[in-house]
Amino acid sequence: MGKSRYEKGLDKLMEFTVKDNKEASTHLKITENFKDIAPDVSKYMIEFTYGDIYTRPGLDNKQRTLVTISSLVTLGAEPQLELHINAGLTAGLTPEEIIEVFIQLLSYTGFPRVLNAIEVARKVFTQRGLSVEIPNHDDLV
């Protein structure tokens, strides 16, 4: 017999979960926080989002996190953005790729949302001991 939606979702979720940094925001911490008030929310998140959607073919983990990060910046959902920046780094995104996504969103989302996203990224990068390689764009100015 195959795995349940929950088991498939939990397996996929673990591909995005940083395990060696206690400060990092993770889905597991969020699901733990809901146990006393809305335990079914975490079950639905794991079954539907990770068991049904994230396990579909067509996008790899890095691409999925880029889409999610972009959507969260657009929504102004900073707590969830922190979580998904961590997930993106765990999936193999670089800090430079994440910052470049923010720059791409400037024209579509606006400066306030992007500036807030950069501050969230700064927090996550600091927690994970990462820095951003600043490209030299002197030839563009």
Image: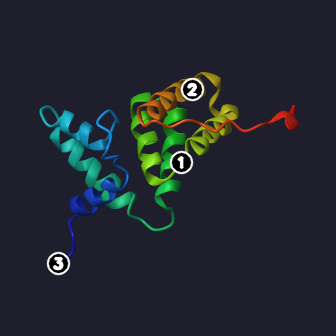
Q: Is residue 53 above or below residue 117?
A: below
Residue type indicated by callout 2: Arg
Q: Report which residue position mark 3 lands on.
A: 1
Q: Quadrant of the C terminus?
A: top right
Looking at the image, the residue that sits furthest to the bottom is: 1
Residue type indicated by callout 1: Leu
Q: Which mark is residue 66?
A: 1
Quick one: label 2 or label 3, which is nearer the N terminus? 3
Residue 28 place in picture, x, y as percent: 25, 43
Along the line of sight, the residue nearer the viewer: 104 or 5 = 104
Secondary structure under tag 2 reads helix
| Color theme of the render | rainbow
Q: Report which residue position mark 2 lands on.
A: 113
The quarter of the displayed image where residue 31 is located:
top left
Residue type indicated by callout 3: Met
Q: Quadrant of the N terminus?
A: bottom left
Q: Is residue 109 above or below residue 43?
A: above
